[in-house]
Image (tube, grey):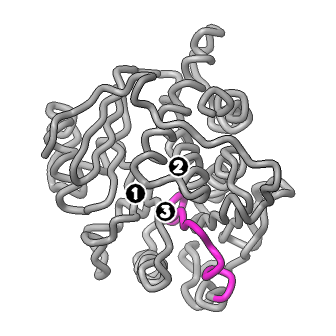
């Protein structure tokens, strides 16, 4: 593993300005797959964040009868739930033609303990060469999955310390005691790019590592991880490379949190993070 670099303005990636002749298909199509009877809001946060980050099209593949109100600019790929309250594989498999139009899959927010759907989506992504951002319940299913992702370079994983601990077979306290070693072990095991969330976030690819010397406790609230998944997915859809999308995604969320803290905010709820995105995003062009 190579040396770690501290993220500063001099090495922070930038987003290319939009060309005058751009159209929605220029900026990709994110499909967010998740949601359950217990957690219907998580994928909506991710999808909304992807849209606010600049993805040209965002589709929400989730529960058809969800009580959560979705923004009208999101497209909907409705699926039915099983008796246990998670997405039905049979229902999802009927949407293959629509799923194949994706530029990026965001998998896991609110998905629940749904291994067969997770394996189906990951297999489909690999077959179609669709990059994936895996978070939340998707991370919790990795160790049970029959589909290997170790050689899939366009996968991005965004665990918090608890999810990282589960994948590595250790405790979250052990992960926090040596975050650098933990993320290196995660990247070695999973491949792709890993973002280890928490104070002073870390980003790791196969040959480089980056650290943010910044802690923003205003983000310590439910849904922040779902928002980050959407931000990274939205950047990835715009053909920004996985490592750069991950670094930028973390930087944008931290800037948003810093702005809230300077306004004396103690917490920045996930819905307000989504609404704050466009203002924070403008600083990265």
Structural distance between the alpha carbons of marks 3 and 2: 14 Å
Residue under numbered circle 2: 232
Residue 66 position within the rendered picture, expressed as x and y whole percent measured from the top left: 74, 64
Q: Residue at x 53, y 49 (%)?
A: 232
Q: Residue at x 16, y 35 (%)?
A: 3
Q: Nearer the viewer, mark 3 or mark 1?
A: 1
Q: Residue at x 80, y 59 (%)?
A: 23
Which image quadrant for residue 134? Answer: bottom left
Left or right, residue 180 beside residue 284: left
Q: Residues within 10 Å of mark 3 (few under 14, many from 20)?
A: many
Residue under numbered circle 3: 108
Instruction: Check contact, mark 1 vs mark 2: CB within 8 A.
Output: yes
Q: Nearer the viewer, mark 3 or mark 2?
A: 2
Q: Is residue 39 visible?
A: no
Residue 57 position within the rendered picture, expressed as x and y whole percent measured from the top left: 73, 62
Please provide the residue range marked out in magenta: 97-111
Tell me which numbered mark, 3 or 2, is placed earlier along the sequence. Answer: 3
Please tell me whether mark 1 sits on a helix, a strand or a loop. strand
Please tell me whether mark 3 sits on a helix, a strand or a loop. loop
Residue under numbered circle 1: 156
Please tell me whether mark 2 sits on a helix, a strand or a loop. helix
Nearer to the camera, 154 or 107: 154
Which image quadrant for residue 29? Answer: bottom right
Q: How many marks?
A: 3
């Amino acid at each position: 593993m190579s040396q770690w670099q501290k993220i500063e303005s001099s090495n922070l990636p930038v987003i290319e300005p939009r060309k005058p002749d751009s159209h929605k298909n220029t900026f990709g199509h994110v499909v967010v797959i998740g949601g359950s009877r217990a957690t219907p809001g998580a994928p909506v946060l991710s999808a909304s964040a992807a849209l606010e980050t600049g993805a040209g099209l965002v589709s929400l593949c989730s529960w058809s009868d969800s009580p959560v109100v979705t923004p009208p600019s999101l497209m909907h790929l409705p699926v039915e739930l099983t008796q246990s309250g998670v997405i039905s594989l049979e229902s999802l498999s009927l949407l293959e033609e629509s799923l194949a139009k994706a530029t990026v899959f965001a998998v896991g927010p609110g998905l629940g303990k749904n291994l067969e759907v997770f394996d189906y989506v990951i297999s489909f992504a690999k077959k179609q060469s669709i990059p994936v951002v895996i978070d939340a319940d998707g991370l919790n299913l990795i160790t049970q999955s029959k589909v290997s992702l170790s050689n899939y370079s366009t996968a991005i994983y965004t665990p918090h310390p608890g999810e990282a601990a589960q994948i590595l077979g250790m405790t979250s306290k052990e992960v926090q005691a040596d975050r650098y070693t933990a993320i290196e072990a995660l990247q070695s095991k999973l491949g792709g790019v890993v973002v280890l969330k928490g104070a002073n976030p870390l980003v790791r690819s196969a040959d480089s590592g980056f650290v943010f010397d910044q802690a923003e406790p205003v983000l310590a609230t439910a849904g922040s991880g779902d928002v980050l998944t959407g931000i990274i997915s939205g950047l990835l859809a715009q053909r920004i490379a996985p490592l750069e999308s991950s670094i930028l995604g973390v930087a944008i969320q931290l800037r948003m949190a810093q702005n809230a803290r300077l306004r004396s905010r103690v917490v920045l709820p996930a819905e307000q993070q989504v609404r704050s995105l466009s203002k924070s995003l403008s600083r990265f062009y």
